[in-house]
Image: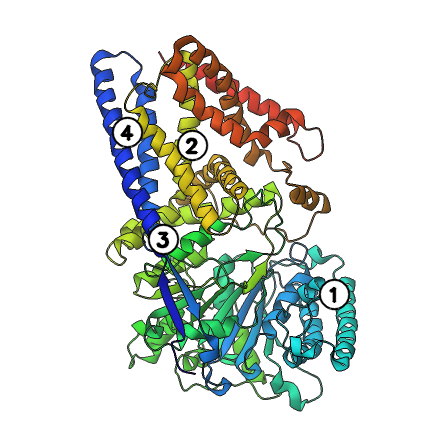
Amino acid sequence: MDGPLNVCRVSTKNLIINRVHMLLNGIAILALFYYRFTTLFRIIETRETPLVPYLIVIFCEIILTLLWIQRRAPRWRPVRRTVYPERLPEDEKLPPVDVFVCTADPSKEPSLGVMNTVISAMSLDYPPDKLAVYLSDDGGSYVTLHAVREAWKFARWWVPFCRKYELQNRCPKAYFSAKESANEKFIGSSEFAADKKIIEKKYEEFQEALERNSVNASRSVSRDHPPTVEVMTDEIRDPDLKEMPLLVYVAREKRPGHPHHFKGGALNVLLRVSAVLSNAPYFLVLDCDMYCNDPTSARQAMCFYLDPKIAPQIAWVQYPQKFHNIGEHDIYDGRIHPVWREGLGLDGLRGPTIYGCNFFMTREAIYATDRKKKDVDINQLKKSFGSSNEFIKSIYINYKTQLPEDRKPSDTLKKELQLLASCTYDNDTEWGEEVGYKYFTVVEDSITALELHCRGWISVYIDPDRPCFMGASPTNLNDMLVQQTRWSFGLMQIGLSKYSPYIYGAFRLSILQTMYYGVLVFDSLYVVPFYGLAIIPPICLLRGIPLYPKVSDPFFIPLAFIFISSQLKHVQEVLSYGDNFMHAVYELRVWMMKCGSCYLLAILNAFLDRFGLGEANFSITSKVVDDEQAKRHEQGIYDFRASPVLLTPLCTAYIINLFSCFIGVARVLQKGDEFLIQAVIPFFGVLLNYPFLEGMFLRKDSGSISPSVTLLAVALAAIILCCGYLLIY
């Protein structure tokens, strides 16, 4: 079919709004700093007020300004892309695609959900002989291996059913839960009704088999096990086997004395194993709970990879993460829409970063083969890619995989697979550095994306109307804070390393790209102005020291403009993305929680790790649903059963500002508008975070904040206020 495979359009309306806001807010910020520094010089000369708190406030405002400037990068040129998969060539001309799914612990990531993801990937609307699915089981669990075998049996029924009746939703669990039917042309068909009954029975049997085998799932996980690679096939030779995608179970070797490099290490093993079994030039990475919601996702990605104008430059095609378990009240900002809104803007630069999963990538980019000389010596290749001759052969375009038609690997191939999945294969090679996903941090996606962008590759972002992938987001406070802390810690690791964007990417990236990667890795620095402005103004309010201009002062206008325009701009971005006003409230509240808890722990742990005083740790976010927590989430009620380490700093900051509200009222009544701004700011924070007041003092249910945390927070707040009062003269 004639016409382009994809079209990129600039979001002109948002572009104009963004740039006008940048200009006006920038002018107001300049006016604010003019006021700050003229006042500072006067204080130095007259000593009319204490100097130190004023310097701290200025320092906090400088950090906020620098972070704000960097965050303008993804708002400079937002774009939207449209694809036309119906214009793709016939199936025979489509390139093969491998799918990588990662899991680690069946007790936290139930097998049924993981297998639904695997089966949905096998059911993609793509030529089955050009599709292969690999499951990485980092726990080496017999529960997961058994589940994959059962998934293969069920998929032998499910995949043909999906293709025959052109199902739109090809995740079994989602299909049966949503009561979706087949394509309209099959509705009312007696044959479809009969086949659906058979499939429903097969799915029930599949569920029962997984439940029987899931007993003691946590005990099946091992950190000390040999490599296991099993290709799923039928015992009896079946001529229809070619109509089924390849399904492979991979448990890489793990030994206590060898670093496993988290998810990056698992993905690199999948790259090597898949290279000698299917060796597709493109691969899709999915999290174990992120099932395929639109079977055309691979075809949509090919609209970029088969476009001769841009294909040679594209390393990956990124889709957003969408979630099926978020209701009307997204109180934990589980949709993480701020990330996806920025994705549209980054696409207008040279593309978004990698967001963990839901992306198609080229092997050429991840192998860095574009940087290797074509006539390079075999020994040099082994230094880069390891000792496997078979894997090195796979790098070349004319390589043919050694897997026979019956999908039963030979003994020689089995030994090769064992070698490629061993824990020592990376040793003395470029894996984790120049080749594959980069190591040293728990956020392998961001550091790998930075490296690829620095090499000159671009990426694209596509957000179709029907979500291509759907997953499960944390629906309780503890999981959300733990997850955000892990991400922030990993990003801060990058910022404190030689890969810091301002050093590593300074001459390799555009200014706007460098700015974005800078704020991405140093986002945790928001903790400094958060605590600086949550503690110093209340102490000064208690002491009767004004830090902000009077309402009658002309410089009140730029300060008020900055605050109001920033909030209105945030609301505008939320509404333009299709969300409601309350979602803007939830986003801002969660951002404050991250500043006060996640970013604080992330920075502390990152510095400990940098100086060798701590060790990076990867905690899996549980996918097991707690009915009580899920019910509260649906009702929009916060469940504060979180770690005291995460909760205490937030409660302490809240109590300090709650106390300052009462002091602020007294100061305003006493001295009028001199302390109005200083009283309004903590009032805004207290009002926005009202659930903390409920959790500490009003609620008595099991989801409230524990009395021990409340008492500790009150004690810490009292100590901070008393010490501050005594130290500031």
Tell me the quarter of the picture where residue 201 sits. bottom right
Which residue type does callout 1 highlight?
Leu
Disc 3 crowd, CA 10 A, few/some/many (<14, 14-19, 20+): few
The residue labelled by disc 2 is 530
Return the residue nearer the eye: 450 or 373.
Answer: 450
**What secondary structure is marked by label 1?**
helix
Q: Which mark is residue 670?
A: none
**Which residue is depicted at the point 29% across and 20% down?**
553
Cα–Cα span, label 1 and label 2:
47 Å
- Residue positioned most to the top: 670
Disc 4 crowd, CA 10 A, few/some/many (<14, 14-19, 20+): some
Return the residue nearer the eye: 217 or 69.
Answer: 69
Mark 3 or mark 2, which has the lower sequence index? Answer: 3
Judged by depth in the image, the label closer to the viewer, 1 or 2, is 2
Q: Position of residue 224 (x, y in %)?
A: 60, 60
The residue labelled by disc 1 is 210
Q: Is residue 583 above or below residue 267?
A: above
The residue labelled by disc 3 is 13
Q: Are marks 1 and 2 in contact (CB under 8 Å)?
A: no
